[in-house]
Image: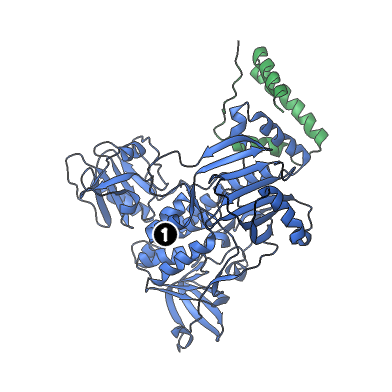
Amino acid sequence: MAATSEHRALFQFAYRRSADQDARAVARHPVVVVGAGPVGLVVAIDLALHGVPVVLLDDSDRIGDGSRGICWSKRTLEICDRLGVGERLVARGVTWKLGKVFRGEDLVFAFDLLPEQSHKMPAFINLQQFYLEKALVDRAGEIDSIDLRWRNRVVGLERRNDGARLTVETPDGRYQIDADWAIAADGARSSMRDLLGLEFKGVTFDDKFLIADVRMHADDIPVERRFWFDPPFHSGQSALMHRQADDSWRVDLQLGPDVDVEAELKPDRFMPRIRKMLGGRDFDVIWVSIYRFNCRRIDRFLHGRVVFIGDAAHQVSPFGARGANSGIQDAENLAWKLAAVIKGEAGTELIESYDCERIQAADENIAHSTRSTDFIAPHSAAERTLRTAVLALAPRAEFARQMINSGRLSVATAYDSPLSTPDEAPFGGSARLGAPVPDAPMRERDGRDGYLLERLGGGFDLLYVRDGKRPQAPPGVALMIIGEDRIDRTGLFAERFDAAPGSTYLLRPDQHLCARWRSYDVGKVSAARTRALGF
Amino acid sequence: MGKLVTTSQFANPDAAFVALVEARRGLSEAAAAALDARLVLILANHIGDQEVLQQAIALAKDAK
């Protein structure tokens, strides 16, 4: 919840009149997505790549410079890579994986977010949200079946058994469109949510935080997440610092619950605070805002033919980068399921699993975010005492270091899902049933080196470790024989998947592992695919 | 003779910390201190090892 923010337009787009506005009858579309932020763009692109045309509406006509999301997680980057923009983002962003926590001036704890080596995508990049949005808008522009309409504001929503009718306001006045499915990706202040009268349930935290982006040349500061409890430059409070692209830095200073927001947004108040933090370095403030945090969600994400994704459905504090990253995972989870339903490969019941799986993820994210915020901003002196004790014990006792919580950073949720086929035999390794599969290096037949994830086909993939047979894949499943089509040169695939000759893994279109066996059985593979499609 | 374990033993350390935080939610500092005293006695008895207790007291006094 921003108390204030000044948005400069960095990228401007043109409103264009749509043929739907001149149609005699209300035009009907399989999918209308409301909101062209990161989450709406991802779901639109993903649906289009699955063969479903999308109308994407946005009430604005620009991408602003208000710095919002900056930390993009490995899973987000893997999704973006599948959509064709991952490498662009990594090249533009700042790659990091180390987090450091200080108490006063002392380092008390450091964590490595990607202990496994040799993944195509890094643990995290930091990149201003507008760059990610621009890359996605550019990508959407390359796809004919995405109809992106700027300055199209949804002002009316009528639910029907077989879809939804939207009333849309434009510079040329209002028009209506029908959608078989409407996706609400219109953010924390979702008008779609208001139009259905849905309410958030959860917690709003009292503490206020000053957030600023500053431009500063500081190549001597290591690229890592730095978090301070009670730093010398900001006594009694917490502070966070992240490097972004273009010599831009995010600083985040806790102000406590009782500050005067208007006063704190005046340069004579925030400049000294930031100057003290940056210790005499030259800097320019690009953007500044004061935030309070919410950890909350709506009860259900699925309301008939209207589906809520991203901040429109759930919100968390930023300590953990679980907001936009989880929204992008919502988008990926929904896209393949909705495409399967629209193409008649699955019944509408499959969409129920979006609600089930992504509410699990939202609850996991909200729980982590609430714990982090409780640790960072104790509710009372009595609670603060306990945190002080943990920080004091941390240098001497490992258990206390494990309790220090400056934000548990976003990792993909392993779904406990009816779509997964329970394991018949035990598997070790880092691959988990219901989670996205770990990446691993793969050598092509022609000797080129690449990665597993970038070689997946976007539908159901079957990974089968060669044991001398050449099995037939059932319909709707793409077979990859490890050891033949692709070579596990490093042995990391075998290690991460606990693979032996004959081991067989079925992956959903969102690269989540939904079944695995110690030997190949076409009937079982076929049944697992059917189950993953909700039957 | 026991040895104090200082490595993390909880499967979910965040959840354990939150349980302690929530136990004192809404309490004054004095009420929280009284709660802590009762907790210390309960947990000390559960450990039931004088050596370990002495090592824990030493560690707590040492850390600040």
Chain containing the residue with disc 1? A
Task: Quickly name the residue at label 1.
Answer: A88
Look at the image and give the colour of chain B.
green
**Left or right for A287, reference A272:** left
- Residue at the spot 54% in from the left edge and 54% down from the top edge: A244
* Figure quadrant of residue A293: bottom right
Front residue (pair A137, A337) = A137
Residue at 41%, 53% in the rendered image = A78
Q: Position of residue A378 (x, y in %)?
A: 72, 43
The x, y position of residue A508, in whole percent, is 36, 53
For badge 1, the amino acid type reads Arg
> Which hue is chain A drawn in?
blue
As drawn, A129 above or below A407: below
Q: Nearer the viewer, residue A55 or A492?
A: A492
Report the side of B6 relative to B58 (left or right): left
* SS for dot 1: helix
Percent position of residue B27, x then y: 79, 38
**Residue at 60% across, 44% down:** A226
